[in-house]
Amino acid sequence: MRRAVRRHAALYAGGVLLLVVGAFPLFWMVSTSLKPSSEIFATPPRLVPAHPTLENFVRLFRDTSFPTFFRNSAVVSFATVALTLTIAALGAYGLTRFAFRGRDQVAALILTTYMFAPIMIIIPFYILVKQLGIVNTRLALVLSYTTFCLPFCLWLLRAFFASIPLELEEAALVDGAGRGRAVWHVVLPLALPGLIATAIFTFILAYNDFLFALVLITSEELKTLPVGVNDLFNATIVDWGMIMAAGVMITVPAVLFFAAVQRYLVQGWGAGGVKG
Amino acid sequence: MRKNALAGWLLLAPSLLLLGTLVVFPILYNAWLSLFDKHAFLPVQRFVGLGHYVYFAHDEEFWNSFGHGLVYAGATLVLQLAVGIPAALLLNEGFRGRNVLRGVVLFPYVIPTIVAVILWKWLLNDSYGIVNAWLVGSGLTAAPVAWLGKDWIMVSLVLTSVWQFFPFVVVTYLARLQTIPPELYEAATVDGAGAWRRFLHVTLPQTASVLFVIVLLRSIWMFTKFDTVWLMAGDGGVSRYIRTLPVYAYARSFTYLQAGMGAALSVIMFVLLIVATAVYFGIFRHDEALA
Protein backbone atom coordinates (compact mmCIF):
# COMPACT_ATOMS: atom_id res chain seq x y z
CA MET A 1 0.00 0.00 0.00
CA ARG A 2 2.66 2.47 1.03
CA ARG A 3 4.67 1.44 -2.04
CA ALA A 4 1.72 2.36 -4.27
CA VAL A 5 1.41 5.77 -2.62
CA ARG A 6 5.12 6.46 -3.05
CA ARG A 7 4.91 5.36 -6.67
CA HIS A 8 2.02 7.73 -7.31
CA ALA A 9 3.77 10.61 -5.62
CA ALA A 10 6.85 10.03 -7.74
CA LEU A 11 4.80 9.83 -10.94
CA TYR A 12 2.97 13.06 -10.22
CA ALA A 13 6.12 14.87 -9.18
CA GLY A 14 7.71 13.84 -12.48
CA GLY A 15 4.57 14.82 -14.34
CA VAL A 16 4.46 18.27 -12.80
CA LEU A 17 8.15 18.79 -13.54
CA LEU A 18 7.62 17.81 -17.17
CA LEU A 19 4.58 20.08 -17.39
CA VAL A 20 6.62 23.03 -16.12
CA VAL A 21 9.53 22.32 -18.47
CA GLY A 22 7.27 21.92 -21.50
CA ALA A 23 4.62 24.51 -20.88
CA PHE A 24 6.04 27.25 -18.67
CA PRO A 25 8.08 29.00 -21.39
CA LEU A 26 4.96 29.12 -23.56
CA PHE A 27 2.83 30.34 -20.68
CA TRP A 28 5.40 33.07 -20.09
CA MET A 29 5.29 34.09 -23.75
CA VAL A 30 1.50 34.47 -23.66
CA SER A 31 1.63 36.27 -20.33
CA THR A 32 4.26 38.75 -21.53
CA SER A 33 2.39 39.41 -24.76
CA LEU A 34 -0.65 40.53 -22.74
CA LYS A 35 1.25 42.88 -20.41
CA PRO A 36 1.54 46.66 -20.74
CA SER A 37 5.18 47.74 -20.91
CA SER A 38 5.19 48.95 -17.28
CA GLU A 39 4.51 45.39 -16.16
CA ILE A 40 6.92 43.76 -18.62
CA PHE A 41 9.86 45.47 -16.94
CA ALA A 42 8.58 45.14 -13.38
CA THR A 43 10.77 43.48 -10.76
CA PRO A 44 9.92 40.99 -9.53
CA PRO A 45 7.92 39.93 -12.59
CA ARG A 46 4.24 39.09 -12.15
CA LEU A 47 3.22 35.66 -13.43
CA VAL A 48 -0.20 36.80 -14.60
CA PRO A 49 -0.70 40.31 -16.00
CA ALA A 50 -2.50 42.60 -13.56
CA HIS A 51 -3.94 44.72 -16.37
CA PRO A 52 -4.05 42.53 -19.49
CA THR A 53 -4.06 44.43 -22.75
CA LEU A 54 -3.97 43.70 -26.47
CA GLU A 55 -1.88 46.78 -27.29
CA ASN A 56 1.18 44.64 -28.15
CA PHE A 57 -0.84 42.81 -30.79
CA VAL A 58 -2.28 46.07 -32.11
CA ARG A 59 1.23 47.53 -32.51
CA LEU A 60 2.42 44.34 -34.21
CA PHE A 61 -0.31 44.41 -36.84
CA ARG A 62 -0.49 48.18 -37.28
CA ASP A 63 3.15 49.28 -37.22
CA THR A 64 5.08 46.38 -38.76
CA SER A 65 5.00 44.21 -41.89
CA PHE A 66 3.89 41.27 -39.75
CA PRO A 67 0.58 40.74 -41.65
CA THR A 68 2.57 40.49 -44.90
CA PHE A 69 5.02 37.97 -43.40
CA PHE A 70 2.06 36.01 -42.09
CA ARG A 71 0.35 35.88 -45.47
CA ASN A 72 3.59 34.86 -47.20
CA SER A 73 4.18 32.05 -44.73
CA ALA A 74 0.62 30.78 -45.16
CA VAL A 75 0.76 30.87 -48.96
CA VAL A 76 4.17 29.22 -49.15
CA SER A 77 3.39 26.54 -46.55
CA PHE A 78 0.06 25.49 -48.04
CA ALA A 79 1.40 25.53 -51.60
CA THR A 80 4.27 23.32 -50.40
CA VAL A 81 1.88 20.89 -48.74
CA ALA A 82 -0.27 20.63 -51.89
CA LEU A 83 2.67 20.15 -54.22
CA THR A 84 4.50 17.70 -51.95
CA LEU A 85 1.42 15.55 -51.37
CA THR A 86 0.72 15.34 -55.09
CA ILE A 87 4.24 14.48 -56.15
CA ALA A 88 4.92 12.10 -53.25
CA ALA A 89 1.60 10.29 -53.69
CA LEU A 90 2.27 9.78 -57.40
CA GLY A 91 5.77 8.54 -56.70
CA ALA A 92 4.75 6.25 -53.85
CA TYR A 93 1.99 4.79 -55.98
CA GLY A 94 4.49 4.10 -58.74
CA LEU A 95 6.88 2.47 -56.25
CA THR A 96 4.25 0.15 -54.76
CA ARG A 97 1.97 -0.73 -57.68
CA PHE A 98 4.36 -1.30 -60.56
CA ALA A 99 7.28 -3.68 -60.79
CA PHE A 100 10.25 -2.41 -62.75
CA ARG A 101 13.96 -2.92 -62.79
CA GLY A 102 15.94 -0.70 -60.45
CA ARG A 103 12.88 0.15 -58.37
CA ASP A 104 14.37 -0.75 -55.00
CA GLN A 105 17.66 0.91 -55.85
CA VAL A 106 15.84 4.14 -56.74
CA ALA A 107 13.91 3.99 -53.47
CA ALA A 108 17.13 3.52 -51.50
CA LEU A 109 18.81 6.35 -53.38
CA ILE A 110 15.93 8.68 -52.63
CA LEU A 111 16.28 7.94 -48.93
CA THR A 112 20.01 8.69 -49.10
CA THR A 113 19.29 12.25 -50.21
CA TYR A 114 17.46 12.68 -46.90
CA MET A 115 20.89 12.69 -45.24
CA PHE A 116 21.84 16.03 -46.72
CA ALA A 117 21.15 18.97 -44.48
CA PRO A 118 20.20 22.09 -46.47
CA ILE A 119 23.19 23.99 -45.06
CA MET A 120 25.49 21.55 -46.86
CA ILE A 121 24.25 22.48 -50.32
CA ILE A 122 22.88 25.98 -49.84
CA ILE A 123 25.65 27.67 -51.86
CA PRO A 124 25.28 25.75 -55.14
CA PHE A 125 21.54 25.76 -54.49
CA TYR A 126 21.52 29.54 -54.40
CA ILE A 127 23.62 29.81 -57.57
CA LEU A 128 21.32 27.35 -59.34
CA VAL A 129 18.16 29.16 -58.29
CA LYS A 130 19.69 32.38 -59.54
CA GLN A 131 20.52 30.75 -62.88
CA LEU A 132 16.91 29.58 -63.16
CA GLY A 133 15.85 33.20 -62.67
CA ILE A 134 13.57 32.48 -59.71
CA VAL A 135 15.61 34.00 -56.90
CA ASN A 136 13.46 36.18 -54.64
CA THR A 137 10.19 34.43 -55.55
CA ARG A 138 7.76 32.34 -53.52
CA LEU A 139 8.15 29.63 -56.17
CA ALA A 140 11.80 29.17 -55.18
CA LEU A 141 10.78 28.59 -51.56
CA VAL A 142 8.01 26.16 -52.48
CA LEU A 143 10.34 24.14 -54.70
CA SER A 144 13.07 24.08 -52.02
CA TYR A 145 10.74 22.86 -49.30
CA THR A 146 9.06 20.32 -51.56
CA THR A 147 12.42 18.89 -52.55
CA PHE A 148 13.65 18.60 -48.99
CA CYS A 149 10.41 17.01 -47.75
CA LEU A 150 10.13 14.55 -50.62
CA PRO A 151 12.48 11.75 -49.50
CA PHE A 152 10.78 11.35 -46.13
CA CYS A 153 7.27 11.77 -47.55
CA LEU A 154 7.89 9.24 -50.31
CA TRP A 155 9.08 6.67 -47.81
CA LEU A 156 6.23 7.30 -45.44
CA LEU A 157 3.59 7.06 -48.17
CA ARG A 158 5.29 4.05 -49.70
CA ALA A 159 4.87 2.23 -46.39
CA PHE A 160 1.20 3.23 -46.21
CA PHE A 161 0.43 2.32 -49.82
CA ALA A 162 2.22 -1.01 -49.45
CA SER A 163 -0.04 -1.88 -46.52
CA ILE A 164 -3.20 -1.45 -48.62
CA PRO A 165 -4.16 -4.82 -50.13
CA LEU A 166 -3.95 -4.87 -53.88
CA GLU A 167 -7.15 -6.93 -54.05
CA LEU A 168 -9.31 -4.00 -52.93
CA GLU A 169 -8.09 -1.94 -55.83
CA GLU A 170 -8.47 -4.79 -58.28
CA ALA A 171 -12.02 -5.44 -57.09
CA ALA A 172 -12.89 -1.84 -57.95
CA LEU A 173 -11.26 -2.27 -61.36
CA VAL A 174 -13.24 -5.45 -61.99
CA ASP A 175 -16.41 -3.58 -61.05
CA GLY A 176 -15.74 -1.31 -63.98
CA ALA A 177 -14.08 1.66 -62.28
CA GLY A 178 -11.16 3.24 -64.14
CA ARG A 179 -7.78 3.23 -62.46
CA GLY A 180 -8.11 6.88 -61.53
CA ARG A 181 -11.43 6.27 -59.79
CA ALA A 182 -10.11 3.15 -58.09
CA VAL A 183 -7.23 5.13 -56.67
CA TRP A 184 -9.40 8.07 -55.66
CA HIS A 185 -12.15 6.04 -53.99
CA VAL A 186 -10.20 3.06 -52.62
CA VAL A 187 -6.50 3.75 -52.18
CA LEU A 188 -6.44 7.38 -51.06
CA PRO A 189 -9.10 7.02 -48.33
CA LEU A 190 -7.24 4.04 -46.90
CA ALA A 191 -3.95 5.92 -47.01
CA LEU A 192 -5.49 8.97 -45.32
CA PRO A 193 -3.54 8.68 -42.04
CA GLY A 194 -0.33 8.56 -44.08
CA LEU A 195 -1.38 11.52 -46.21
CA ILE A 196 -2.21 13.53 -43.10
CA ALA A 197 1.08 12.68 -41.41
CA THR A 198 2.88 13.71 -44.60
CA ALA A 199 0.95 16.97 -44.73
CA ILE A 200 1.80 17.85 -41.13
CA PHE A 201 5.45 17.01 -41.54
CA THR A 202 5.63 19.13 -44.69
CA PHE A 203 3.72 22.03 -43.18
CA ILE A 204 5.93 22.16 -40.09
CA LEU A 205 9.11 22.06 -42.16
CA ALA A 206 7.95 24.78 -44.57
CA TYR A 207 6.46 26.99 -41.85
CA ASN A 208 9.60 26.69 -39.72
CA ASP A 209 12.31 27.13 -42.34
CA PHE A 210 14.78 29.93 -41.79
CA LEU A 211 17.79 29.16 -44.00
CA PHE A 212 16.19 29.02 -47.47
CA ALA A 213 14.06 32.07 -46.71
CA LEU A 214 17.14 33.94 -45.49
CA VAL A 215 19.19 33.16 -48.59
CA LEU A 216 16.59 33.11 -51.37
CA ILE A 217 14.34 36.04 -50.42
CA THR A 218 15.60 39.62 -50.44
CA SER A 219 12.55 41.86 -50.70
CA GLU A 220 10.56 42.85 -47.63
CA GLU A 221 7.18 42.05 -49.18
CA LEU A 222 8.10 38.40 -49.87
CA LYS A 223 9.67 37.56 -46.52
CA THR A 224 8.17 34.77 -44.44
CA LEU A 225 7.65 34.82 -40.68
CA PRO A 226 10.97 33.45 -39.36
CA VAL A 227 13.15 35.90 -41.29
CA GLY A 228 10.70 38.78 -40.97
CA VAL A 229 10.35 38.42 -37.21
CA ASN A 230 14.11 38.04 -36.78
CA ASP A 231 14.48 41.37 -38.61
CA LEU A 232 11.93 42.95 -36.28
CA PHE A 233 13.89 41.56 -33.35
CA ASN A 234 17.19 42.95 -34.59
CA ALA A 235 15.86 46.27 -35.84
CA THR A 236 16.04 48.53 -32.79
CA ILE A 237 15.74 48.27 -29.03
CA VAL A 238 13.75 45.09 -28.55
CA ASP A 239 10.05 45.71 -27.97
CA TRP A 240 9.57 42.57 -25.86
CA GLY A 241 5.81 42.83 -25.57
CA MET A 242 5.41 43.06 -29.33
CA ILE A 243 7.98 40.34 -30.03
CA MET A 244 6.20 37.96 -27.64
CA ALA A 245 2.91 38.85 -29.34
CA ALA A 246 4.55 37.87 -32.63
CA GLY A 247 5.68 34.60 -31.04
CA VAL A 248 2.12 33.86 -29.93
CA MET A 249 0.73 34.66 -33.38
CA ILE A 250 3.28 32.38 -35.07
CA THR A 251 2.67 29.55 -32.62
CA VAL A 252 -1.13 29.49 -32.78
CA PRO A 253 -1.50 28.16 -36.36
CA ALA A 254 1.25 25.59 -35.85
CA VAL A 255 -0.32 24.28 -32.66
CA LEU A 256 -3.86 24.30 -34.08
CA PHE A 257 -2.80 22.49 -37.22
CA PHE A 258 -0.92 20.01 -35.11
CA ALA A 259 -3.52 19.45 -32.39
CA ALA A 260 -6.22 18.76 -34.98
CA VAL A 261 -4.36 15.78 -36.35
CA GLN A 262 -1.86 14.84 -33.64
CA ARG A 263 -2.90 11.20 -33.34
CA TYR A 264 -2.04 10.59 -36.99
CA LEU A 265 1.35 12.17 -36.54
CA VAL A 266 2.43 9.74 -33.85
CA GLN A 267 1.88 6.95 -36.37
CA GLY A 268 3.95 8.78 -38.93
CA TRP A 269 6.65 9.45 -36.39
CA GLY A 270 6.87 5.79 -35.54
CA ALA A 271 7.39 5.08 -39.21
CA GLY A 272 10.59 7.02 -39.52
CA GLY A 273 11.06 10.14 -37.49
CA VAL A 274 10.66 13.80 -38.29
CA LYS A 275 13.64 15.79 -39.37
CA GLY A 276 14.84 18.74 -37.36
CA MET B 1 1.19 -6.01 -59.23
CA ARG B 2 1.61 -5.08 -62.88
CA LYS B 3 4.82 -5.19 -64.79
CA ASN B 4 4.61 -1.81 -66.40
CA ALA B 5 7.96 -0.14 -66.18
CA LEU B 6 6.92 2.96 -68.11
CA ALA B 7 4.00 3.80 -65.83
CA GLY B 8 6.19 3.28 -62.77
CA TRP B 9 8.90 5.59 -64.02
CA LEU B 10 6.40 8.20 -65.19
CA LEU B 11 4.81 8.35 -61.75
CA LEU B 12 8.25 8.75 -60.18
CA ALA B 13 9.40 11.30 -62.74
CA PRO B 14 8.35 14.47 -60.88
CA SER B 15 10.10 13.30 -57.70
CA LEU B 16 13.24 12.30 -59.53
CA LEU B 17 13.31 15.52 -61.53
CA LEU B 18 13.11 17.66 -58.38
CA LEU B 19 15.60 15.60 -56.38
CA GLY B 20 17.97 15.38 -59.32
CA THR B 21 17.92 19.09 -60.07
CA LEU B 22 17.77 20.50 -56.56
CA VAL B 23 19.70 17.96 -54.45
CA VAL B 24 21.93 15.64 -56.50
CA PHE B 25 23.15 18.30 -58.93
CA PRO B 26 23.95 20.83 -56.17
CA ILE B 27 25.88 18.15 -54.25
CA LEU B 28 28.10 17.47 -57.25
CA TYR B 29 28.34 21.14 -58.17
CA ASN B 30 29.29 21.89 -54.57
CA ALA B 31 32.26 19.50 -54.71
CA TRP B 32 33.37 21.08 -58.01
CA LEU B 33 32.90 24.60 -56.65
CA SER B 34 35.12 23.85 -53.66
CA LEU B 35 38.10 23.70 -56.02
CA PHE B 36 37.62 27.32 -57.12
CA ASP B 37 37.96 30.80 -55.78
CA LYS B 38 34.44 31.92 -56.56
CA HIS B 39 32.55 35.07 -55.63
CA ALA B 40 29.08 34.37 -54.24
CA PHE B 41 27.29 36.69 -56.66
CA LEU B 42 29.68 37.52 -59.48
CA PRO B 43 30.59 34.97 -62.16
CA VAL B 44 34.37 35.30 -61.70
CA GLN B 45 36.12 32.14 -60.63
CA ARG B 46 39.71 30.90 -60.47
CA PHE B 47 40.88 27.32 -60.09
CA VAL B 48 42.76 26.72 -56.84
CA GLY B 49 42.65 22.93 -56.62
CA LEU B 50 42.72 21.74 -53.04
CA GLY B 51 43.87 25.18 -51.89
CA HIS B 52 40.83 25.84 -49.71
CA TYR B 53 41.25 22.55 -47.89
CA VAL B 54 44.90 23.30 -47.19
CA TYR B 55 43.89 26.75 -45.97
CA PHE B 56 41.32 25.39 -43.52
CA ALA B 57 43.79 22.87 -42.12
CA HIS B 58 45.69 25.86 -40.72
CA ASP B 59 42.70 28.11 -40.09
CA GLU B 60 42.14 28.83 -36.42
CA GLU B 61 38.52 29.82 -37.05
CA PHE B 62 37.88 26.47 -38.69
CA TRP B 63 39.20 24.51 -35.71
CA ASN B 64 37.28 26.74 -33.30
CA SER B 65 34.07 26.10 -35.22
CA PHE B 66 34.78 22.40 -35.33
CA GLY B 67 35.35 22.37 -31.56
CA HIS B 68 32.18 24.36 -30.89
CA GLY B 69 30.28 21.90 -33.08
CA LEU B 70 31.55 18.93 -31.06
CA VAL B 71 30.71 20.60 -27.76
CA TYR B 72 27.28 21.71 -28.98
CA ALA B 73 26.30 18.40 -30.59
CA GLY B 74 27.75 16.35 -27.71
CA ALA B 75 26.18 18.36 -24.89
CA THR B 76 22.77 18.66 -26.54
CA LEU B 77 22.73 14.95 -27.42
CA VAL B 78 23.53 13.81 -23.89
CA LEU B 79 21.02 16.20 -22.33
CA GLN B 80 18.28 15.35 -24.81
CA LEU B 81 18.69 11.71 -23.84
CA ALA B 82 18.92 12.53 -20.15
CA VAL B 83 15.65 14.45 -20.28
CA GLY B 84 13.87 12.56 -23.05
CA ILE B 85 14.26 8.96 -21.87
CA PRO B 86 12.97 9.51 -18.30
CA ALA B 87 10.14 11.60 -19.74
CA ALA B 88 9.21 8.78 -22.15
CA LEU B 89 9.32 6.22 -19.30
CA LEU B 90 7.06 8.47 -17.26
CA LEU B 91 4.60 8.96 -20.10
CA ASN B 92 4.48 5.19 -20.61
CA GLU B 93 3.02 4.73 -17.11
CA GLY B 94 -0.71 4.93 -16.49
CA PHE B 95 -1.84 8.01 -14.58
CA ARG B 96 -4.55 10.57 -14.87
CA GLY B 97 -3.71 13.45 -17.20
CA ARG B 98 -1.19 11.40 -19.14
CA ASN B 99 -2.61 12.16 -22.58
CA VAL B 100 -2.70 15.89 -21.92
CA LEU B 101 0.91 15.74 -20.77
CA ARG B 102 1.89 13.82 -23.90
CA GLY B 103 0.48 16.67 -25.96
CA VAL B 104 2.15 19.37 -23.86
CA VAL B 105 5.56 17.74 -24.16
CA LEU B 106 5.35 17.99 -27.93
CA PHE B 107 4.86 21.78 -27.86
CA PRO B 108 8.52 22.79 -27.94
CA TYR B 109 9.12 20.60 -30.99
CA VAL B 110 6.16 22.02 -32.91
CA ILE B 111 6.79 25.73 -32.44
CA PRO B 112 9.08 27.30 -35.03
CA THR B 113 12.75 27.79 -34.15
CA ILE B 114 12.47 31.57 -34.35
CA VAL B 115 9.87 31.49 -31.56
CA ALA B 116 11.90 29.11 -29.40
CA VAL B 117 14.97 31.34 -29.66
CA ILE B 118 13.33 34.72 -29.00
CA LEU B 119 11.37 33.14 -26.17
CA TRP B 120 14.53 31.85 -24.46
CA LYS B 121 16.32 35.12 -25.04
CA TRP B 122 13.49 36.72 -23.10
CA LEU B 123 13.50 34.11 -20.33
CA LEU B 124 17.28 34.51 -20.01
CA ASN B 125 17.36 38.30 -20.42
CA ASP B 126 19.97 39.62 -17.99
CA SER B 127 17.98 42.56 -16.57
CA TYR B 128 14.33 41.56 -16.89
CA GLY B 129 14.40 37.79 -17.51
CA ILE B 130 12.41 35.58 -15.19
CA VAL B 131 15.25 33.08 -14.80
CA ASN B 132 17.50 35.72 -13.28
CA ALA B 133 14.62 37.01 -11.19
CA TRP B 134 14.26 33.53 -9.69
CA LEU B 135 17.98 32.99 -9.25
CA VAL B 136 18.50 36.26 -7.44
CA GLY B 137 15.16 36.13 -5.60
CA SER B 138 15.91 32.70 -4.17
CA GLY B 139 19.44 33.69 -3.27
CA LEU B 140 21.06 31.09 -5.53
CA THR B 141 23.15 33.79 -7.16
CA ALA B 142 24.08 37.13 -5.67
CA ALA B 143 23.83 39.02 -8.97
CA PRO B 144 21.99 38.39 -12.28
CA VAL B 145 23.83 36.06 -14.65
CA ALA B 146 24.74 37.45 -18.09
CA TRP B 147 23.26 34.43 -19.88
CA LEU B 148 23.72 35.93 -23.33
CA GLY B 149 27.21 37.29 -22.67
CA LYS B 150 30.33 35.54 -23.87
CA ASP B 151 30.80 33.30 -20.82
CA TRP B 152 27.31 31.82 -20.81
CA ILE B 153 26.13 32.04 -24.42
CA MET B 154 27.06 28.42 -25.18
CA VAL B 155 25.17 27.23 -22.10
CA SER B 156 22.14 29.25 -23.17
CA LEU B 157 22.32 27.86 -26.68
CA VAL B 158 22.52 24.29 -25.38
CA LEU B 159 19.61 24.92 -23.00
CA THR B 160 17.44 26.35 -25.77
CA SER B 161 18.28 23.51 -28.15
CA VAL B 162 17.65 20.77 -25.59
CA TRP B 163 14.28 22.29 -24.77
CA GLN B 164 13.44 22.50 -28.44
CA PHE B 165 14.49 18.98 -29.45
CA PHE B 166 14.08 16.62 -26.46
CA PRO B 167 10.46 15.90 -27.50
CA PHE B 168 11.83 14.05 -30.52
CA VAL B 169 13.54 11.60 -28.14
CA VAL B 170 10.36 11.32 -26.07
CA VAL B 171 8.13 10.49 -29.03
CA THR B 172 10.42 8.01 -30.73
CA TYR B 173 11.40 6.27 -27.50
CA LEU B 174 7.80 6.17 -26.28
CA ALA B 175 6.64 4.63 -29.57
CA ARG B 176 9.06 1.75 -29.00
CA LEU B 177 8.28 1.40 -25.27
CA GLN B 178 4.62 0.84 -26.10
CA THR B 179 5.45 -2.23 -28.15
CA ILE B 180 7.37 -4.08 -25.40
CA PRO B 181 5.26 -7.13 -24.37
CA PRO B 182 4.07 -6.72 -20.73
CA GLU B 183 4.84 -10.41 -20.13
CA LEU B 184 8.54 -9.59 -20.11
CA TYR B 185 8.07 -7.25 -17.16
CA GLU B 186 5.82 -9.72 -15.38
CA ALA B 187 8.41 -12.47 -15.74
CA ALA B 188 11.13 -10.16 -14.42
CA THR B 189 8.98 -9.16 -11.46
CA VAL B 190 8.31 -12.80 -10.64
CA ASP B 191 12.07 -13.31 -10.71
CA GLY B 192 12.34 -10.62 -8.05
CA ALA B 193 13.73 -7.79 -10.17
CA GLY B 194 13.12 -4.26 -8.85
CA ALA B 195 12.28 -1.26 -11.02
CA TRP B 196 15.91 -0.43 -11.74
CA ARG B 197 16.80 -4.01 -12.72
CA ARG B 198 13.68 -4.30 -14.87
CA PHE B 199 14.82 -1.18 -16.71
CA LEU B 200 18.35 -2.54 -17.07
CA HIS B 201 17.44 -6.07 -18.16
CA VAL B 202 14.16 -5.62 -20.03
CA THR B 203 13.66 -2.03 -21.17
CA LEU B 204 17.19 -1.22 -22.23
CA PRO B 205 17.81 -4.31 -24.38
CA GLN B 206 14.36 -3.99 -25.94
CA THR B 207 14.96 -0.35 -26.86
CA ALA B 208 18.59 -0.69 -27.96
CA SER B 209 17.68 -0.50 -31.65
CA VAL B 210 15.63 2.66 -31.34
CA LEU B 211 18.33 4.27 -29.20
CA PHE B 212 20.82 3.43 -31.92
CA VAL B 213 18.72 5.35 -34.44
CA ILE B 214 17.95 8.25 -32.08
CA VAL B 215 21.62 8.82 -31.26
CA LEU B 216 22.59 8.63 -34.95
CA LEU B 217 19.91 11.03 -36.21
CA ARG B 218 20.17 13.53 -33.38
CA SER B 219 23.98 13.69 -33.62
CA ILE B 220 23.84 14.36 -37.35
CA TRP B 221 21.07 16.91 -37.00
CA MET B 222 22.69 18.77 -34.12
CA PHE B 223 26.07 18.84 -35.87
CA THR B 224 24.47 20.35 -38.99
CA LYS B 225 22.07 22.63 -37.12
CA PHE B 226 22.10 26.12 -38.56
CA ASP B 227 19.03 28.13 -37.59
CA THR B 228 19.05 27.79 -33.80
CA VAL B 229 22.76 28.62 -33.57
CA TRP B 230 22.53 31.48 -36.04
CA LEU B 231 19.44 33.03 -34.48
CA MET B 232 21.01 32.89 -31.02
CA ALA B 233 23.78 35.36 -31.80
CA GLY B 234 23.75 36.23 -35.51
CA ASP B 235 27.06 37.12 -37.06
CA GLY B 236 28.66 39.64 -34.74
CA GLY B 237 29.18 40.20 -31.02
CA VAL B 238 29.31 37.02 -29.02
CA SER B 239 28.61 34.81 -32.04
CA ARG B 240 32.24 33.76 -32.17
CA TYR B 241 31.83 31.91 -28.88
CA ILE B 242 29.20 29.59 -30.35
CA ARG B 243 30.06 29.58 -34.05
CA THR B 244 29.76 26.04 -35.43
CA LEU B 245 30.76 24.74 -38.87
CA PRO B 246 27.34 25.33 -40.50
CA VAL B 247 27.41 28.95 -39.34
CA TYR B 248 31.01 29.33 -40.45
CA ALA B 249 30.13 27.93 -43.88
CA TYR B 250 27.24 30.36 -44.14
CA ALA B 251 29.40 33.30 -43.07
CA ARG B 252 32.14 32.41 -45.58
CA SER B 253 29.59 32.18 -48.40
CA PHE B 254 27.18 34.98 -47.70
CA THR B 255 29.04 37.43 -45.48
CA TYR B 256 32.55 37.24 -46.96
CA LEU B 257 31.00 36.16 -50.31
CA GLN B 258 33.63 33.43 -50.77
CA ALA B 259 31.38 30.75 -52.26
CA GLY B 260 34.28 28.41 -53.06
CA MET B 261 35.44 28.42 -49.45
CA GLY B 262 31.91 27.90 -48.19
CA ALA B 263 31.54 24.96 -50.57
CA ALA B 264 34.79 23.45 -49.27
CA LEU B 265 33.45 23.70 -45.70
CA SER B 266 30.28 21.89 -46.77
CA VAL B 267 32.36 19.10 -48.31
CA ILE B 268 34.41 18.83 -45.10
CA MET B 269 31.20 18.58 -43.03
CA PHE B 270 29.89 15.91 -45.35
CA VAL B 271 33.08 13.83 -45.14
CA LEU B 272 33.17 14.20 -41.34
CA LEU B 273 29.60 12.91 -41.10
CA ILE B 274 30.27 9.97 -43.39
CA VAL B 275 33.35 8.97 -41.41
CA ALA B 276 31.61 9.41 -38.05
CA THR B 277 28.60 7.41 -39.23
CA ALA B 278 30.83 4.60 -40.51
CA VAL B 279 32.73 4.47 -37.21
CA TYR B 280 29.46 4.52 -35.28
CA PHE B 281 28.08 1.60 -37.27
CA GLY B 282 31.38 -0.22 -36.86
CA ILE B 283 31.33 0.11 -33.07
CA PHE B 284 27.67 -0.39 -32.24
CA ARG B 285 26.35 -2.62 -34.90
CA HIS B 286 25.03 -5.76 -33.30
CA ASP B 287 22.71 -7.76 -35.44
CA GLU B 288 19.83 -7.48 -33.02
CA ALA B 289 20.27 -3.72 -32.87
CA LEU B 290 19.33 -3.45 -36.51
CA ALA B 291 16.45 -5.90 -36.34
Image (spheres, rainbow, N blue to C red):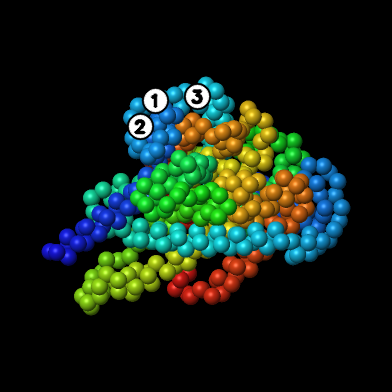
Image position of A24 (left or right of A94): left
**Residue A201, image x and y in percent?**
49, 45
Gap in angstroms between the C-alphas marked 2 and 3:
18 Å
Mark 2 or mark 3, which has the lower sequence index? 2
Q: Which mark is residue A59?
A: 3
**Residue A228, image x and y in percent?**
58, 34
Give amino acid for label 2.
Pro
Q: Quadrant of residue B89?
A: bottom left
Q: Is residue A160 visible?
A: no
Q: What residue sits 40% from the left and 38% below the top?
A: A43
Q: Which mark is residue A49?
A: 2
Give amino acid for label 3.
Arg
Q: Tell if the residue under mark 2 belongs to the same chain as the one under mark 3.
A: yes
- B88 versus B189 height, above or below: above
Which chain is mark 1 on? A
The residue labelled by disc 1 is A53
Query: Is A50 or B166 nearer to us in this picture?
Result: A50
Q: What residue sits 63% from the left and 27% below the top?
A: A221
Query: Is A108 or A175 nearer to us in this picture?
Result: A108
Give amino acid for label 1.
Thr
Q: Is residue A240 visible?
A: yes
Quick one: label 3, few (<14), some, or many (20+) residues within 10 Å?
some
Which chain is mark 3 on? A
Image position of A164 (left or right of A123): left
Quick one: label 1, few (<14), some, or many (20+) residues within 10 Å?
some
